[in-house]
Image (tube, rainbow, N blue to C red):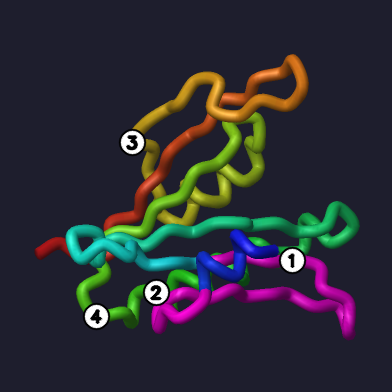
């Protein structure tokens, strides 16, 4: 909780969106802008998650569109980045359909017990200046 709070607190352009089924939270997605002045042209999407029973209903796409629409309104925003486990093929497909392109592949980026998971690093260029 502390890490999430630090990521979004006291920053005008940091936010989290949620998807609800009635009062039940079924999905989340977060956005933060680079803190360093040299990184203000970049934003990052993090924590995209939809509960298993709510998947395949367009919730992740709707949250991503909301995030991207809001991020595109930020003055000076040029590119939006994210990382996704290479094993999450549905998520990779969604991000590509929204215009994200892979710019790197990190082998063994995550470790769960004795198991390693590669990550795909993706970027969406929203403006060029």
Q: Is residue 92 found left or right of 37 in the rendered image?
A: right
Picture residue at 56% right of the left edge, 43% below the top: 93
> Which residue sits at x=40%, y=49%?
100
The correct choice, above or below, for 31 with respect to 108 in the image is below
> Residues in magenta?
9-30
Numbered label attached to residue 103: 3
- Alpha carbons under labels 1 and 4: distance apart: 27 Å
Q: Residue 53 at what x, y percent from top left?
A: 90, 57
- Closer to the chain start, of discs 3 and 4, is 4
Give the crowd class for mark 1: few <14, some 14-19, many >=20 residues within 10 Å.
many
Residue identifier under label 1: 27
* Mark carried by residue 71: 2
For numbered disc 4, what is the local secondary structure? loop
The residue under label 4 is: 75
Q: Earlier in the sequence, mark 3 or mark 2?
A: 2
Q: Quadrant of the C terminus?
A: bottom left
> Closer to us: mark 3 or mark 4?
4
Image check: 67 left or right of 125?
A: right
Residue 57 placement (x, y as % from top left): 77, 63
How many C-alpha atoms fall within 10 Å of the one at disc 4: few (<14), some, or many (≥20)? few
Q: Is residue 112 magenta?
A: no
Query: Does residue 122 appear left or right of residue 57 in this picture?
Result: left
Task: Tell me which label, 3 or 1, sits earlier in the chain.
Answer: 1
């Amino acid at each position: 909780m502390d890490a999430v709070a630090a990521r979004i607190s006291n920053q005008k352009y940091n936010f989290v969106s949620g998807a609800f089924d009635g009062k039940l939270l079924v999905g989340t997605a977060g956005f933060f802008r680079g803190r360093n002045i040299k990184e203000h042209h970049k934003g990052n999407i993090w924590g995209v998650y939809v509960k298993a029973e709510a998947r395949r209903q367009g919730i992740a796409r709707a949250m991503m569109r909301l995030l991207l629409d809001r991020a595109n309104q930020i003055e000076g925003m040029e590119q939006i980045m994210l990382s996704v486990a290479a094993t999450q093929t549905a998520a990779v497909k969604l991000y590509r359909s929204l215009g994200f392109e892979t710019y790197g592949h990190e082998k063994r980026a995550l470790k769960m017990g004795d198991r390693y998971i590669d990550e795909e690093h993706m970027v969406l260029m929203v403006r060029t200046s």
